[in-house]
Amino acid sequence: MQNLEALQRILSSPQKVVIIPHQKPDADALGSCLALAGYLQKFSHEITVIAPTDYPHFLSWMKGNENVLVFEHSKEKIIEHLILNTDVIFCLDFSDLARIVPLDKYVSASTATKVMIDHHIDRKAFAPFELWKPEAAATAELVYDFICLLGGEQWIDVPIAECIYAGIMTDTGSFKFPSTTSKIHRTIANLMDIGVNHAKIHHHIYDTNSENRLRLTGFALKERLTILREYRTAYFALSSSDLRTYQYQTGDTEGLVNYALSLEGIIFAAILIEDTDKIKLSFRSIGGFSANNFARNHFSGGGHHNAAGGRVSGGKLENVVKTFTNLLPTYKESLLNSI
Ligand code: 5GP
Ligand code: MN
């Protein structure tokens, strides 16, 4: 990180600090925020974590979750007392303010010192302090590095370590994605030495399904999966009525897209989900085919080379499915040649 000493000087006296993850925060985004919050609290800073939207209940075990403010639920307080009237704003797991709409305009307007820590590809610079490494497996990995850069490794206690572990575990697909390095394993070993109970974290995140979530998964696999072998592509399309039938809760479709990618011979997978005002899309790929470019070029989104997301505002599900499938012939060559 450039200007680390200037940031260290700012943090050497108690500050009012706001920490923000991206919309619909996942374990990496929320875990990074709560790990950093836990660390900074030890130095008498006044910390508030503000999530732009709600997030899955399987993250609620993280220490500090009980104090997270969700923007949708307390807008005025958040804008006037926190964002516009704070000393430092940390932006974690995003590098484009468009990822925190509708908080973006208040963060832009705030005169606070902004610090961005992230690993997504399409950075749109907005902060004077940046720890931005697209090659990092997780923002939580960078938060760990950041704490070490500040010389604070010995302050990482079990709750902080658990949040970092959860972020790294989920963003590496439980340590299977190509982004998993020996450095990641060394960091994980350090977290385990601190006392992380890894089995407990896997259980909280992967084995606390509701019956509805499991049955929605079964329904999607049986009724809503389309396989287009000629494009080495498979996708799910879920309507809002499908979601209602299974009393959908935030997070219930997380990871579903990976089932499509697990099919032998499939290297590109998508899930299209109908929301009230938009269709949300998630893309996953294996090898050279860029999910990020696909999401960025056609669905106002982005993310990482092999995992990205996007959206269509106000579209109808069947039309967006058509738009998606109509794009595939253009990409046929790269889909078939991708290794
Ligand atoms: P997911 O498909 O799990 O929602 O997201 C996959 C990856 O793409 C994550 O790293 C996520 O942060 C990123 N992502 C998801 N939706 C969007 C989007 O609309 N815009 C951008 N730039 N990134 C996204
Ligand atoms: Mn991440």
Image: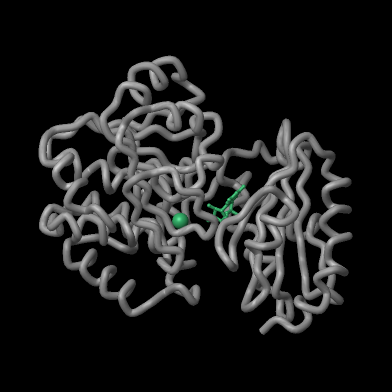
Q: State the residue in front, 55 or 71.
A: 71
Residue drawn at 84 percent across, 61 percent down: 327
Judged left or right of residue 40, residue 25 is right
Q: Total number of numbered labels?
A: 0
Judged left or right of residue 68, residue 293 is right
- Estimate the x, y position of residue 252 in percent, counting from the top left: 59, 46
Q: State the residue in front, 85 or 311.
A: 85
Compared with residue 326, is residue 290 higher up or lower down, i.e. above or below? below
Residue 274 shows in this picture = no
Compared with residue 223, is residue 187 higher up or lower down, i.e. above or below? below
Judged left or right of residue 5, residue 119 is right
- Estimate the x, y position of residue 228 in percent, counting from the top left: 84, 70
Residue 309 shows in this picture = yes
In which quadrant is the N terminus drawn?
bottom left
Judged left or right of residue 39, residue 312 is right
Compared with residue 69, is residue 164 higher up or lower down, i.e. above or below? below
Residue drawn at 65 percent across, 73 percent down: 262
Instruction: Name the quadrant containing residue 43.
Output: top left
Instruction: Name the quadrant containing residue 149.
Output: bottom left
Instruction: Name the quadrant containing residue 267.
Output: bottom right
Q: State the residue in front, 111 or 39.
A: 111
In which quadrant is the C terminus drawn?
bottom right
Q: State the residue in front, 248 or 194.
A: 194
Residue drawn at 42 percent across, 74 percent down: 180
- Estimate the x, y position of residue 189 in percent, counting from the top left: 24, 72
Is the image coloured rainbow, by chain, by secondary structure, or in one colour?
Answer: one colour
Residue drawn at 78 percent across, 52 percent down: 237
Compared with residue 286, is residue 117 higher up or lower down, i.e. above or below? above
- Estimate the x, y position of residue 8 in percent, counting from the top left: 16, 47
